[in-house]
Amino acid sequence: MALACMSCGAYAQTEQGQRRRPFHFDATHPDVHDPVMAKGEDGRYYIFSTGMGVGVMSSKDMKEWRPEKPVLQPIPAWATDTVRGYRGHTWAPDISYQKGLWRLYYSCSTFGKNGSAIGVAVNKTLDPNSPDYGWKDEGMVIASHRHQDNYNAIDPNLIVDKKGQPYLTFGSFWDGIQLVKLSKKDFKTPQGAPVTIARRVGRKLTLAELNDATKFEIEGNDTIEAGENAIEAPFIFRHGKYYYLFVSFDYCCRGERSTYKTVYGRSKDVRGPYVDKEGRKMEHGGGTYLYGPDATYFGLGHCAAYDFDGQSYFVSHAYEKEQNGRAKLFIRPLRFDDEGWIIP
């Protein structure tokens, strides 16, 4: 929520090869990467996604979409000053309505490195025709630094617990998925250090191990350095008495070679531990398979989940085989069995 390397890691968010293709907006089957969704005051559904300044599109029925203006105009100076190489192509946003404001968290990073930062912008309404419409950037929430931190500050998702306490989950590769408590006052200031709540590998990876990770050259002029912990794109969805943690395993962003898989676990406490259907803790490598490669898709991941009008929905992108691996919007109803586990 991550851009893939050849064999070492993925870091949510764009497909280098596909970015070079001529773009034509497909209203009924749109290309999208890392989608999140909200229902606006005007009754339309809004999707925010990876793109220059954060991509936006809207629909009245989740079937036919139209493009909207990007969120970040202009690109915040703090982001280009903080993240070396970031030039506005903004990854993996998250959208939610809290305390009278729409809050959009977004990722600033560069391919395959954990010199990254998460920012937040706010708006009173999602309706671009409203006189109250206008995004205001509120700056940085949290950053990660190369060779200093064992996490990557991308793929943010805000979750507010039953007591009104906000938390931000985020992460890609390195030592996995992080959770940090935020200030109730501003929904922005971290309260303490991030804690790892999910990994692909079954043990904690030290900073020394991560710094010694094998480096791979990409297209002759870029380098990735994230190690083997192929997990990213967290999203926590509160439903009934459980918090459900969705994450993506394996590799995104490689078109026909994408192997993304969505897995999940659950907990009665937002802080975890999150446990899969077999009783395995996600911080030790657990995760119940939900969606992934099949007859239609090369891979499927970077998901979100919502309740709209009494129905739960699963939203993600999927690398479609008939489209030569292009990342397409994937929306399905989300159903639960009598024990609260998700029915694929």
Image (cartoon, rainbow, N blue to C red):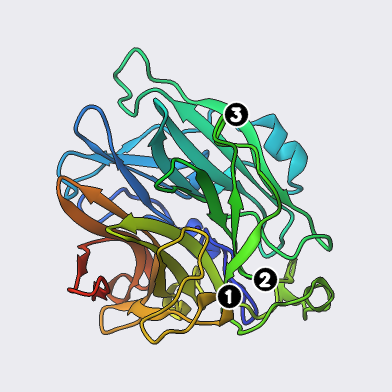
Q: Is residue 133 left or right of residue 1?
A: left
Dot 3 surroundings within 10 Å: few (below 14), some, or many (20 or more)? some
Cβ atoms at labels 3 and 1 below 8 Å apart: no
Lower sequence index among marks 2 and 3? 3
Q: Is residue 324 left or right of residue 286?
A: left
How far apart are labels 2 and 3 at the CA level? 28 Å
Query: What residue type is disc 1 on?
Result: Arg
Q: Is residue 78 left or right of residue 103?
A: right
Query: What residue type is disc 3 on?
Result: Glu
How far apart are labels 3 and 1 at the CA level? 30 Å
Query: Which of the 4 image quadrants contains residue 330?
Result: bottom left
Query: What residue type is disc 2 on?
Result: Asp
Q: Secondary structure at mark 1?
A: loop
Q: Secondary structure at mark 3?
A: strand
How far apart are labels 2 and 1 at the CA level? 7 Å
What residue lies at 22% left-to-right and 56% top-to-bottom?
312
Lower sequence index among marks 2 and 1? 2
What residue lies at 44% left-to-right and 72% top-to-bottom?
255
Q: Can residue 74 be spotted in the picture? A: no
Cβ atoms at labels 2 and 1 below 8 Å apart: yes
Q: Quadrant of the C terminus?
A: bottom left
Residue 175, disc: 2
Q: Position of residue 257 (x, y in %)?
A: 47, 80
Q: Which residue is mark 3?
A: 138
Q: Position of residue 229 (x, y in %)?
A: 62, 78
Q: Position of residue 135 (x, y in %)?
A: 48, 25
Dot 1 surroundings within 10 Å: few (below 14), some, or many (20 or more)? many
Q: Which residue is mark 1?
A: 199
What residue lies at 54% left-to-right and 35% top-to-bottom?
184
The vertical placement of 51 against 243, above or below, is: above
Q: Nearer the viewer, residue 23 or 253?
A: 253
Q: Nearer the viewer, residue 45 or 283?
A: 283
